[in-house]
């Protein structure tokens, strides 16, 4: 009986009886034979209802469990089917694994924790499973959490954003809670239908309690928010307003590059073929310096900007306009509105078409930008969530479909990642 207790503790086999353990030479793995205790036997694998036995199913099955040292471990048991009143013939529930899973719960939770906290290659090599399998595991761990927590309760001030992935071919719509800093909702797509799904889940009563919605000024967001969150003030967020200025600056940078000498691929020598030279190369290399916030610049990037100031006054003016707008939109209240006025009169007279156009756009969205200055919602949350999601979409490359990607994002940023097996949550 003591052996039974040791094995149950080691492999997360609560509510199971250990019948024996052996080393399978062929599989090179320890195989622990078990059966569920009587109390949890004959329940539907989907809903847990106690149901009459249907047949033996496909006989004995194995579930991958956490390794014993460096040796793989499988839990082995019969997998009979029961006839559920709702789901028909279904493989019976087992206490050590999720329905339809090839891994134990502990293995799943361990893999999901690693996927959130370490690198892709670390997970794959440490656990000896395919990355796509990690995706399936993350999806089912995520589904368990979604079923157990209501993330949409108590929302007052939210941010809505769209994120592109698969090199801009696919989109996610995400919702963050400005008060907790957590991601609360994500779904594939970026259109009215997608956002309506969010408000369907929220329900009219909770939607009426929303006071502020920050978002990019996309029309589809504005329309749905106006229709579904009647009491909410819609405001811009500094991150998106600054990103408009960065786009305008890029137009100007392309103009500079097109006019620069040295951009033609005239040198046929293999070493320099296809590369920009001279001024064109300088402009190309300076793009990060132009995009970055000045306080984050490296010494080299400072030199690149100095070079632009000397050689291309117009591109330099465009850079200053971008920085000026970034400066203005980070002020709050009346101070911000005055700063915005000064910026607008500067931009209107700047004779750089992309920024004259940007000034018009700012005027069009003035009400939302002023609401942003009055609301005091911080830019940091949207910006950092946006950056983290972008990173996660690259990590999730190779997962099958958007579900595992969304599950990974929710695990990482939703505040409910399962702890490692055997560890309690910090709040417990
Ligand atoms: Zn059922």
Image (tube, rainbow, N blue to C red):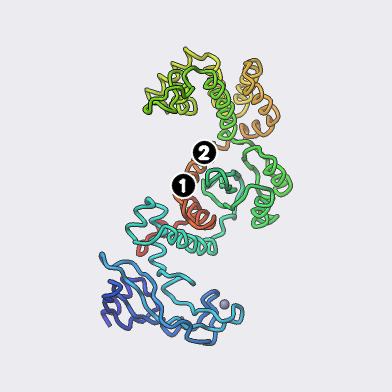
> Where ligand 1 lies, by quadrant?
bottom right
> In the image shown, does 5 or 411 lie closer to the viewer?
411
* Element at label 2: helix
Category of crowding for the residue at label 1, using alpha-carbon neighbours closer than 10 angstroms: few (below 14), some (14–19), many (at least 20): few
Residue 303 place in picture, x, y as percent: 40, 19
Residue 394's label in the rendered image is 1
Q: Horizontal and vertical percent for residue 287?
A: 47, 27
Residue 166 x, y percent position in the rendering: 53, 47
Element type at mark 1: helix
The disc label shown at residue 383, or none: 2
Q: Is mark 2 within 8 Å of ligand 1?
A: no
Dot 2 alpha-carbon crowd within 10 angstroms: few under 14, some 14 to 19, many 20 or more: some
Tell which residue pokes out farthest to the front in this image.
268
Q: Decide: marks 2, 1 in contact (CB < 8 A)?
A: no
Residue 238 lies, with reference to residue 276, above or below; the image says: below
For residue 375, side relative to residue 143 (left or right): right
Q: Position of residue 214 (x, y in %)?
A: 62, 40
Residue 424 seen anywhere in this rendered image of the structure: no
First in sequence, mark 2 or 1: give its number.
Answer: 2
Q: Which residue lies at the image location 36% right of the left edge and 56% below the top edge? A: 123
Depth check, front residue: 182 or 140: 140
**Quadrant of the rendered structure where residue 206 is?**
bottom right
């Amino acid at each position: 009986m003591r052996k039974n207790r040791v094995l149950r503790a080691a492999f997360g086999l609560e509510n199971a009886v250990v019948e024996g353990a052996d080393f399978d030479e062929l599989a090179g793995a320890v195989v622990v034979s078990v059966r569920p205790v009587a109390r949890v036997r004959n329940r539907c694998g989907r809903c847990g209802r106690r149901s009459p036995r249907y047949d033996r199913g496909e006989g004995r099955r194995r579930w991958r469990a956490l390794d014993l040292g460096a040796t793989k471990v499988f839990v082995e048991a019969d997998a009979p089917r029961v006839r559920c009143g709702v789901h028909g013939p279904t493989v019976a529930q087992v206490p050590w694994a999720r329905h339809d899973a090839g891994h134990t719960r502990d293995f799943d939770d361990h893999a999901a924790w690693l996927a959130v906290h370490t690198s892709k290659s670390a997970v794959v090599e440490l656990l000896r499973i395919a990355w796509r399998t990690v995706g399936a595991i993350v999806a089912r761990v995520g589904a368990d959490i979604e079923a157990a927590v209501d993330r949409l309760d108590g929302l007052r001030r939210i941010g809505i954003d769209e994120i592109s992935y698969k090199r801009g071919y696919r989109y996610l719509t995400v919702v963050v809670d400005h008060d907790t800093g957590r991601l609360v909702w994500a779904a594939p797509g970026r259109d009215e239908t997608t956002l309506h799904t969010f408000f369907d889940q929220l329900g009219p009563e909770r939607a009426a309690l929303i006071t502020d919605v920050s978002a990019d000024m996309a029309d589809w967001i504005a329309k749905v928010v106006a229709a579904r969150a009647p009491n909410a003030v819609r405001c811009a967020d500094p991150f998106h307003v600054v990103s408009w200025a960065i786009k305008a600056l890029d137009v100007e940078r392309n103009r500079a590059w097109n006019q620069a000498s040295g951009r033609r691929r005239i040198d046929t020598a293999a070493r320099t073929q296809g590369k920009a030279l001279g001024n064109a190369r300088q402009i190309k290399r300076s793009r990060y310096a132009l995009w970055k916030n000045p306080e984050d610049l490296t010494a080299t990037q400072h030199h690149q900007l100095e070079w632009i100031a000397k050689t291309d006054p117009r591109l330099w003016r465009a850079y200053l306009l971008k920085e000026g707008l970034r400066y203005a939109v980070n002020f709050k209240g009346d101070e911000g509105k005055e700063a915005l006025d000064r910026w607008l009169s500067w931009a209107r007279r700047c004779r750089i078409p992309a920024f004259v156009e940007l000034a018009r756009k700012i005027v069009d969205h003035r009400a939302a930008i002023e609401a942003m200055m009055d609301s005091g919602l911080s830019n940091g949350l949207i910006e950092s969530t946006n950056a983290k999601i972008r990173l996660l979409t690259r990590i999730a490359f190779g997962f099958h479909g958007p579900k595992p990607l969304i599950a990974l994002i929710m695990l990482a940023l939703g505040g409910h990642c399962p702890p490692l097996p055997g560890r309690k949550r910090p709040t417990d």
